[in-house]
Amino acid sequence: MDILKNIRVVLVEPIFGGNIGSVCRAINNNGITDLAIVAPRPETDWEDARKLACQAKEQFEAIKTFETLADAVADCTVVAGTSARTGFYRDTAYSPKEFAPIGLESAKDHKIALVFGREDKGLFNEELALCTHIIQIPSDALYTSLNLSHAVYVCCYEMYCAAGIFVPSEEKAEEASSDLRERMFEVWREMMVQTEFTHKQKLEHMMMGLRRIFTRGKLTVPDVKILMGLAKQSIWVADQWNKEKTANEHE
Amino acid sequence: MDILKNIRVVLVEPIFGGNIGSVCRAINNNGITDLAIVAPRPETDWEDARKLACQAKEQFEAIKTFETLADAVADCTVVAGTSARTGFYRDTAYSPKEFAPIGLESAKDHKIALVFGREDKGLFNEELALCTHIIQIPSDALYTSLNLSHAVYVCCYEMYCAAGIFVPSEEKAEEASSDLRERMFEVWREMMVQTEFTHKQKLEHMMMGLRRIFTRGKLTVPDVKILMGLAKQSIWVADQWNKEKTANEHE
């Protein structure tokens, strides 16, 4: 979907090749394909990056590099910087969930940027100054230091979810109707009687228990067929047992 | 918060030490501290795991190991398995967002488990059979293979968000009242006149433009003070300029 193609993920001076590779996967998992690195470091292990990119090899080859953050976001309208700390105008931060619809609104017609700082020092103040929005990822007060690719993942995941593109796997089997369900319960009642599972005066009580168990979630037609078949088999076994008993009595 | 302490993250036969270390960080970032590994592999690089755990060293030391998944989840009520594929009863999957409140409801009083499969093969059918819920992480149809620690991160992040513990950084400065705002606009109007910025007949039109710009977001008291001070300074400069002009005319 084009709206996600308008989102550029920008990494400022990342240190570890492994993180860059993991970011390639993270953005592709969420339908995003525009990745830029500002001021790549000579010491970065690019072999590690390629390895961690796994099947996101194309993404890895397509990384753009820029000398400055200003260059990397020059054509973007909304520029959202991520920050763990507070202070220096970081106090009006959005959560990734709150930011997602705001960012998507602009991404309909324009390039927007999600900007992530160095693993050790984050974004500098002069970089945050270029940002129109600050994103703060919710995290435990005792352990606020996020891995770079985890931070990228969460922000991109929220954009992807908010875009509403994903079609979840759904139960394809038909849901059972009340009529089918009731026929099944009739068979189970019969089974309880035939197997001598319960006293007659407790039968309705047990049936109510069974109803509660089986209707706690949705029952599909195949589910009902399994349950009905199982009960019928028990009735058949009870019948066989009765026949055996009768035969043995006659011996 | 205790509710998150009742969530156990279970990794089944993970291959890469780096992923195990990244998972240590991922769960701690989201307030979760119970990590179990089922059937650890002899070839796993535990030094790599320790390195990637970064400051989550304590978490790394606290990893529990089990021989089977059944052992690892024996004391858990809800057992949620993650799966990328569909089929074999995977079709009634929950998204991490949908599952979070369901899981937390049980985690109030009981241990629950989030189960993640091998990097290459996921969870086997007999392992999914132990699960009460299946979680499917929304991802792009073209690139569905998630890094293990990314999958863990997203599931834990949704649990953490749903727990409602996080207190975001908020703007601490007082929001400006209408009265203060109007005094500021008065000074800006004066500045427009004194600096001869606009013709008198366009003044109200320009003022409306300024109002739209400055009230698009919330203005705080310090914001208004900056804007008011800046306008006053321009008025002062315009005044100095007029005095110079008058003086020069008299020379």
Image: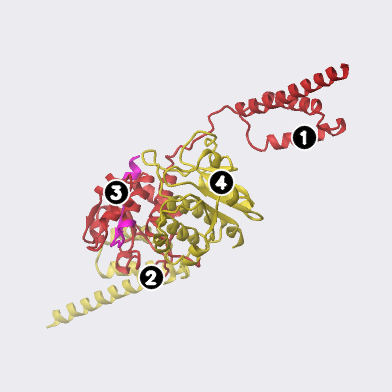
Chain colours: A red, B yellow
- The Cα–Cα distance between marks 4 and 1, rounded to whole angstroms, is 28 Å
Say which chain tag 4 marks: B
Have a look at marks 1 and 2 and say if they share a chain: yes
Find residue B80 and name its label.
4
Chain letter of mark 2 equals: A
Per the rendering, the mark at residue A34 is 3
Say if labels 4 and 1 share a chain.
Answer: no
How far across and how far down the image is residue B10, in percent? 53, 52
| First reached walking from the N terminus: tag 2 or tag 3 | 3
Task: Check the picture and name the quadrant holding the C terminus of chain B.
Answer: bottom left
* Closer to viewer: mark 2 or mark 4: 4
Residue A26: tell me if it is visible.
yes
- Residue situated in front as seen by the camera: A242 or B230: A242
Q: From mark 3 to mark 4, how far is it between C-alphas?
A: 33 Å
Q: Foreground: A180 or A95?
A: A180
Cβ–Cβ under 8 Å for marks 2 and 4: no
Q: Are marks 2 and 3 in contact (CB under 8 Å)?
A: no
Sooner in the amino-acid sequence: mark 1 or mark 3: 3
Mark sitting earlier along the chain (1/2)? 2
Circle 1 sits on which residue?
A: A208
